[in-house]
Amino acid sequence: DSGVTQTPKHLITATGQRVTLRCSPRSGDLSVYWYQQSLDQGLQFLIQYYNGEERAKGNILERFSAQQFPDLHSELNLSSLELGDSALYFCASSPTGQRVTDTQYFGPGTRLTVL
Amino acid sequence: AQSVTQLGSHVSVSEGALVLLRCNYSSSVPPYLFWYVQYPNQGLQLLLKYTSAATLVKGINGFEAEFKKSETSFHLTKPSAHMSDAAEYFCAVSDPGNQFYFGTGTSLTVIP
């Protein structure tokens, strides 16, 4: 158990809908990262937050957005969903947000299925 | 731009045999390199990382990797495979701008 929790574990929805994925980091970690893992695109970094502020942005679509709240939990919002958005979405957390020196701890993921 | 290539999407070894998983990178600046492992139905776990210190990096579970700048490689090895090593392994590279790129992964099967 990494200490990172993600809810829900599974999500099934229809095209065009909007969903919110939630992540609670390990106690004491200030940074949260979101990743997408799909058969087509492999594992991709989406976005990183540190203490409520966006730190780095990867291959995140404009239909997707994220935020980190004052209590440090984070939400990833996916809108106008398409079939291709079906994937496993991972959240990770780390103490300081310095990706090179920090170790990232990954949650178990949320599996999103878009029908 | 950074990129990572993992040669061999599937590797099978016998229990007790050497594990060698290949990773080559391209980077315009000195890279930071990582190996992660993903067990079935779980998130990723960091095995080891190279951050421009020693070129031979030792990680958890008996794994190690050697950074070879001349070959732009960061191959992962373990002298003796265990059944518990069966998993998906990802090589990743990060640049100073905090961008992070993963390879396509190598699925390791250990044959008893």
Image (spheres, coloured by chain):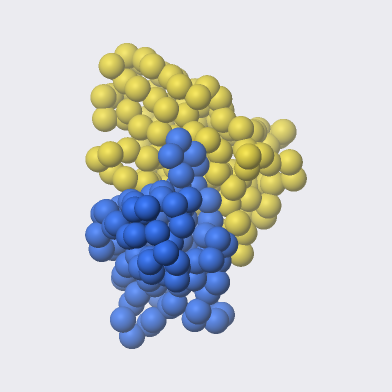
Chain colours: A yellow, B blue
- Residue at (47, 29) in percent of width and height: A110
Q: Position of residue B4 (x, y in %)?
A: 32, 63
Q: Position of residue B18 (x, y in %)?
A: 38, 69
Whether A48 is drawn above or below B50: the answer is above
Q: Is residue B75 left or right of residue A25?
A: left
The mark tally for this picture is 0
Q: Residue furthest front?
A: B112
- Residue at (74, 45) in percent of width and height: A28
Whether A11 is drawn above or below A103: the answer is above
- Residue at (57, 62) in percent of width and height: B60
Whether A59 is drawn above or below B97: the answer is above
Q: Which residue is nearer to you in this view: A23 or B13?
A: B13
Picture quadrant of residue B71: bottom left
* Quadrant of the drawing holding the N terminus of chain B: bottom left
Q: Position of residue B106 (x, y in %)?
A: 32, 55
Q: Is residue A68 left or right of residue A8?
A: right
Q: Which residue is nearer to you in this view: B110 or A61?
A: B110
Q: Is residue A74 left or right of residue B101?
A: right
Q: Is residue B95 visible?
A: no
Q: Is residue A8 visible?
A: yes
Q: Which residue is nearer to you in this view: B58 or A83?
A: B58
Q: Position of residue B91 (x, y in %)?
A: 39, 60
Q: Residue furthest bottom?
A: B70
Q: Which residue is nearer to you in this view: B110 or B28?
A: B110
Whether A56 is drawn above or below B8: the answer is above
